[in-house]
Image: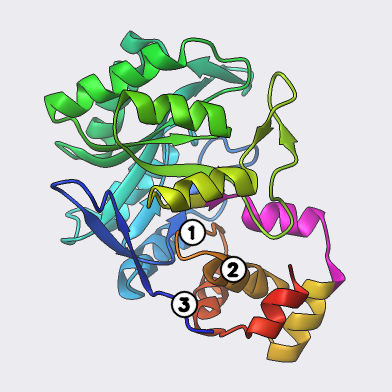
Amino acid sequence: MNTPQIITIAGKSNHPLTVNRLGYGTMRLTGEGIWGEPKRRDEALEILSETAKQGINFIDTADYYGEDVTNRLIAEALYPYKDGLVICTKVGSARKPDKSWIPYNKPKELRQSIENNLRTLKLEQISLVHFRVMHGDKGLEESMEAMFAMQREGKILHVGVSNVNRKELEIAMSIGEIATVENLFGHAQRGDMSGAHGDTRGGEEVLHLCEENEIPLIPFFSLQTANQKKDTRIAEIAKKYEATEAQINIAWLLHHSPWLLPIPGTSSLQHFKENIEAVNINLTAGDMEYLK
């Protein structure tokens, strides 16, 4: 089965962004607990430099990774940025001194987050920003209106959402143009993460809505959940192709829907290079049926 090698973000807008269909998520470049500097800082910078060499032009980050560690590493390794590089960040959350995660989604807080991302990434405009919905969040409409206000000001080019169920995505779409969705998704995780009220976040029903509206879905934690939920079928296909299970999980995403934009993250240069090789694995229709 041939899979598309590129994907277009906000294809119906006046400013579409076309990127290669394997990105890189930077969260793993932080210290333990997604906090502080990486243990192997030189290797983290080398991975980021390698993204440019390998043609990866979609990088996912957030100012609450670290805190602010991944943004600073990106700027150190890649600034001045090459034309066509899309740096995607997230807002709507923050970290407390005890490393816990809290909502940070009031209009004033969102604006502070955007200003901080602009400063640390050394940008005048962020190409793509996801508003991350935290469990128990209220006031989605107010948060989204603040996001679109900053888009009109030119601080944000495109607005996306993260960690949403179908209803939340529909609400966001009713307020403005949603360019992308970033949700938990993978072969081992297709919709059993419950929200604050028992609702399902992520999953196939969100992907279907994205497909209907030509909205790329960016899966997160696809490899982590695969490691936690071992599937002997993945292992069998990996043996068939003399590949790693991580590579097959990535290949499955690329084949499952042309609207999926995987962003596998790692702090290992070796694993990074292995992940890139997954784009060359052409699963058959029979493979995909077996992995269904």
Label 3, secondary structure: give it. Answer: loop
Mark 3 / mark 1, whichever is N-terminal: 3
What residue is rendered at 23% in x and 49% in y? 12
Magenta residues (range) = 219-232
Relative to 277, is 228 above or below? above
> Percent from the top left, x then y, of residue 227?
76, 59
Mark 2 / mark 3, whichever is N-terminal: 3
Q: Tell which of 99 and 249 is nearer to you.
A: 249
Q: Is residue 66 visible?
A: yes
Q: Mark 2 = which residue?
A: 250
Q: Quadrant of residue 163?
A: top right
What residue is rendered at 45% in x and 17% in y? 140
Q: Residues within 10 Å of mark 1 (few under 14, many from 20)?
A: many
Q: Mark 1 = which residue?
A: 260
Label 1, secondary structure: give it. Answer: loop
Total numbered labels placed on residues in the image: 3
Whether residues under marks 2 and 3 lie with C-beta atoms below 8 angstroms apart, the answer is: no
Q: Tell which of 272 and 277 is nearer to you.
A: 277
Q: Quadrant of residue 80?
A: bottom left
> Percent from the top left, x then y, of residue 57?
31, 62
Q: Tell which of 216 and 85 is nearer to you.
A: 216
